[in-house]
Amino acid sequence: MKAGRLLTPFISPAKGIVDVPGSKSFTNRALICAGLADGTSVIENFLMADDTEAMIAALEDLGVLVIADENGGSLQVTGLSGPPAISDISINARLSGTTSRFIVPAVAVGRGKFTISGEAPLMRRPFHDQIVALRSLGANISELGEAGCLPLKVDANGLEGGTIHVSGEKSSQFASGILMAAPLMKNGLTLHLEGAVVSRPYIELTLDVMRRFGAEISNPADGTYVVSPTGYQPAEYYVEPDASAASYMFAAAAITGGTVRVNGLSRSSKQGDIKFVDVLEDIGATVHSGDTFLEVSGGPLSGGKFDLKDFSDTAQTLAAVAAFASAPIEIEGIGFIKAKETDRIEAMATELERCGVSVNRSQNGMVINPNQWALRSAQVETYDDHRMAMSMSLLSLRVSGIEILDPECVDKTFPKFFEVLESLRDNNDFFSGTTPVIAIDGPAGAGKSTIAKLLAEHLGVPHFDTGAMYRAVTLACLDAGLDVENVQAVALLAKKIEIRVGSRVQIDGVDVSERIRGIEVGQNVSAVAANSLVRTILVERQRRWAIESGGGVMEGRDIGTAVFPDAALKIFLTATVDVRAKRRFDEKSDQSLEQVKKEILSRDETDSSRQDSPLRIAANAVIVDTSNSTIGRTVELLGMLFRSEVIQ
Ligand code: DC
């Protein structure tokens, strides 16, 4: 069995100020430029992760000296003072797309024989466009394996440079790699980008880093870049925090309605992924940009249609956020992410579906159709893709039982991801400022009564069954021969009678515990529960009841939304319709399973569509799916959430 990491939902909005690792894109570009520069550069706030380690190892193979300072804050890179010159070596780019696509042009401008390979998933990724472009400049490249893929052998003898046309349709990494090698071509290079360029901001970012290391580039026309044969000068370079890594923290704020600040970023960053916050703003979050920080506060999230072509690394983050929006979110312009670490559209759609989210895939993107009622606990596959692990982890903020398989894949770009996410947990003292009530809401058959009762016992606090109150009023009406549709009269009766709900239920001192569970009460209680006047009377009593008892576990349909919206812990207990129907069927056998299922669906509809206090998932409620859990395990989980314990 694969090792997984079971994540604990947040019971309060995410809150905090965090540092995220330096940008992978900047780090690997700065490493290449520094590695080819004439002297020693210092790179600060670099990202130390799988992809950058792959780049450092590749540069060291080429003779670049890389020394990390004691606390790992900066790197000293002593460059080759020109193109690499070596007799015959093999370089393993591991799983790193940027390393392979930046190193191949860098060795092509050098002298010697270079074999570039990688781990199996990298060898499957396309290389064709770069091979064609480099060959057109005179590079001698052989494909040792499958055509258009790694491993490649470069028999290098320097490049003269000149003019080339590079397709920008599949990956901007090809163009970036060739541009970075261009200052070392004898005559420099004029590069024309052709077709719709995916991720254009990455090209801007490449040019920005190159200029910082002394390159001279002009841009006489859109998509045309002229690079002079200047070589590179050493520089002191500060790597900006990674905007894609920051997207997960901003998403946490959006999903939980919290506030999260990431240091060192601003809206004017050259990183394309910074645009992710614009999307969050469009769907309802608030963004505050300082000079040295960017902060997102969540709000109710709406739907929308967004083209993520220029910031596709955040497409999975947005897809995860979409699971909590109030309307569908359509992501387009990202067909090319099918050829990333994995087919990211297919992988994300599959894993969201596993968690109960409906997704329509297309060649160019996907549409996420949120329905929080359908959210389920699940074991989530990560496909060796760090972004799958990080984005799917976001579901766990609101949904219990999300287990991320192979969580170590986050090491690729964000080794401390889980710690940083965890630091946003607001470990509120339960009893300060909020009502010490655990609110348990959910549809019929989710297990509310049993679980609420056991949880109250487990914690040694009172249990409040609010449904019994509505049932008691209904019984009193029936006994008095009142029409339950007579709004005014029913409310008057509700006001007059004294209802006691404890281990037994009494009306005016008479025990009615069994009678309120009768068929006739069951058939009429919905009408009574839909009576706004009755609700006003009973909700007031429920509040007083809990406050006078010093808090406890209260179950119903509107506890987290109307009775105690500031409850210390809000739970939305749910299960699939099939499981709920089976449970009810096992309790009473006078109906067929199909009939029971139909009745449950119609009750879901009545409970959630009535005018007054419909059954809704409260803001910040933790969604707990009991479909595959035992009662004991659910009670234990809720106890842990109550005690603010994190699943280890
Ligand atoms: O949980 P139960 O089946 O005993 O609830 C009886 C009815 O009362 C059911 O139709 C939903 C309604 N109810 C409600 O509207 N609000 C509550 N807080 C509790 C129950």
Image (cartoon, rainbow, N blue to C red):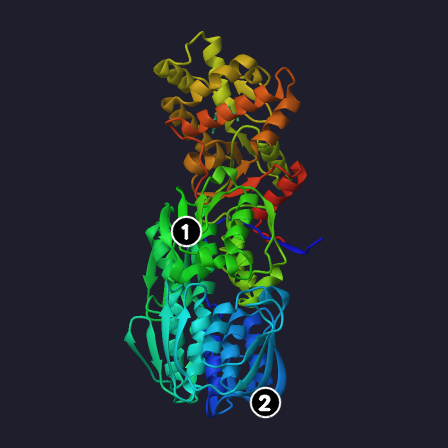
Coordinates of residue 230 in the picture (x, y in percent): 39, 89
Seen as rendered, the residue at the extreme right is 1
Coordinates of residue 74 in the picture (x, y in percent): 50, 81
Sequence-earlier tag: 1 or 2: 2
Q: How many neighbours does mark 1 have within 10 angstroms: few (below 14), some (14-19), or many (20 or more)?
A: many
Name the residue: 46% across, 30% down. 542
Task: Look at label 1 and name its amino acid.
Answer: Ile
Q: Quadrant of the C terminus?
A: bottom right
Q: Is 233 rendered above or below residue 394?
A: below
Say which of 213 and 236 sits in front: 213
State whether label 2 is within 8 Å of ligand 1. Answer: no
Name the residue: 49% across, 37% down. 373
Q: Residue 58 — which label?
A: none
The residues bearing labels 1 and 2 have C-alpha atoms spaced at a distance of 46 Å
Name the residue: 45% across, 32% down. 615
Q: Is 578 rendered above or below residue 196?
A: above
SS assignment at label 2:
strand
Seen as rendered, the residue at the extreme left is 220
Residue with the mark numbered 1: 331
Coordinates of residue 331 in the picture (x, y in percent): 41, 51
Residue with the mark numbered 2: 86
Task: Look at label 2 and name its amino acid.
Answer: Ile
Residue 16 appears in the picture as rendered: no
Residue 1 appears in the picture as rendered: yes
The answer to whether the residue labelled 1 contacts the one labelled 2, judged by CB atoms less than 8 Å apart, is no
Q: Is residue 139 toward the left or the right of residue 195 in the image?
A: right
